[in-house]
Amino acid sequence: MTAIRLIWTVLLLLALLVGVLCLVQEYVEPLPPGLPAAPAVGPALCRGPFLTPEQGQAMLDFALSQCPDRLAWEARAAHHRTCILQAMGLEPLPRRTAPGLIMRGRSEHTGYSVESVAFAAIPGLYVTGNLYRPLSRPPPYALILSPHGHGDVQNARVSETEQKRCATLARMGALVLAIDMFGYGESMGQIPDHQAHQSPLALTVQTWSSMRALDVLCALPGADPARIGVTGESGGGTQTFLLTALDPRVAVEVPVVMVSSFFFGGCLCESGLPIHRSSRHFTTNAEICALAAPRPLLVISDGKDWTRLVPVQEYPFLCRIYALYGAAARAQVANVHLADEGHDYGASKRAAMYPFMAAHLGLDLHAVSRPDGSVDETPVTMLPPEALHVFSPDHPQPADALPSLNAIATGLKALQ
């Protein structure tokens, strides 16, 4: 009889476990009233200004009502991470393979060096970029990933704002990696005519490439994997808060001119997959940004785009989420709002980012400061685009480069 009772006890526990798993799998979040209806068929995409500012505020208020304490928030956060990864096709994450790091064309400048790099996010999918290193500074080094925004399709990675912020952060003591968006810059040599960036696959590839970029940074000599920061503007801001939400290695994030509760990103690389809405969840970029909590977060906003309401709408929401972790965590979230400025990563926005990164990553702000305390970017040497390219007629792209979106999608799937 004892054995029979034991068997029945085990079966009952298994049944309960299966029931719990089914409930978790089928959990559907409640939603506030008055939102756009989900489509009857097809993915529930949230593109561009999908909500009104009032609906965005309702989403934030409702999320707070569902999370009276830290435990409730962390359950919601875990659910959203899973839904986002599933929508991207990254659940489970692909197996990590050797990046095969390529490094060329190193040059030295005032306080930093720069070289051209490429690595394989998966075999045959090459991510192109530039690595900025501090000169005459002992390790260990903080690590910073700097994704660019939408703009000059050919030269966004080597733009003035990208070169200035990467070089200045390197002069402050960080190893800084700037990478091309998928289907931008040198990555167009793999799939030409900007075709790759016009596919929803761009969202998946960029997220996975960012995770692999952190792998590359962490493996560099002198790297300190405990001090990782990410900052980018516009579409690079989207990459910044998505990576931080999904990769716990990121210690500090500074998304610039992108965080909003009603604007979801106008490009397929930001909203071409149902990462915001499915039959089981509905979230906003502001709430995705909050998945960073309690890690240090600086949101830089302006008065001329969808971040114009951040001081009165998204920032108070972020403060409420961070406060769930206590007073010390509440002090980790900040907002710099430049009401008279627009959609860029200009000098004043970079000036707000540098001290935040310095404070939270242990960088040397004094190394780049004038006597009045302002940051001096004039020592940065602006290099022409061709000087920062990793591939050229003399150094062509590797022969195993995958030639199509289908081949890349298949390669990702094969690693899961």
Image (spheres, helix red, strand yellow):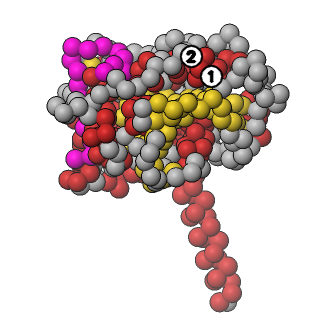
Res. 300 visible in picture: no
Circles 2 and 1: CB atoms closer than 8 Å: yes
| Residue that numbered label 1 is attached to | 389
Front residue of 271 and 207: 207
Q: Quarter-wise, where is residue 155 in the image?
A: top right
State the separation of the CA atoms marked 2 and 1.
7 Å
Query: How far from the left and from the top, in percent, is residue 116?
Result: 61, 29
Quarter of the image containing the N terminus?
Answer: bottom right
| Residue that numbered label 2 is attached to | 385
Q: Is residue 211 left or right of residue 59?
A: right
Name the residue type under label 1: His
Q: Quarter-wise, where is residue 127 in the image?
A: top right
Quarter of the image containing the C terminus?
Answer: top right
Q: Is residue 241 left or right of residue 178?
A: left
Residue range of the region highlighted in magenta in the rendering: 331-347
Rendered residue at 68%/47% (across/down): 96
Query: How far from the left and from the top, in percent, is residue 201?
Result: 64, 25
Q: Does the magenta-highlighted stretch encompass residue 338?
A: yes
Q: Is residue 293 left or right of residue 8?
A: left
Rendered residue at 50%/45% (across/down): 247
In the image, residue 205 sits, relative to residue 42, either above or below, namely below
Rendered residue at 56%/16% (across/down): 385
Element under disc 1: loop
Could you classify mark 2 by the number of other residues whose Cα lies within 10 Å: few (under 14), some (14-19), or many (20 or more)? some
Q: Is residue 189 left or right of residue 227?
A: right
Name the residue type under label 2: Pro
Could you classify mark 1 by the number of other residues whose Cα lies within 10 Å: few (under 14), some (14-19), or many (20 or more)? many
Rendered residue at 77%/40% (across/down): 414
Query: How far from the left and from the top, in percent, is residue 227?
Result: 43, 50
Residue that sits furthest to the bottom in the current view: 2
Res. 224 visible in picture: yes
Front residue of 415 and 63: 415
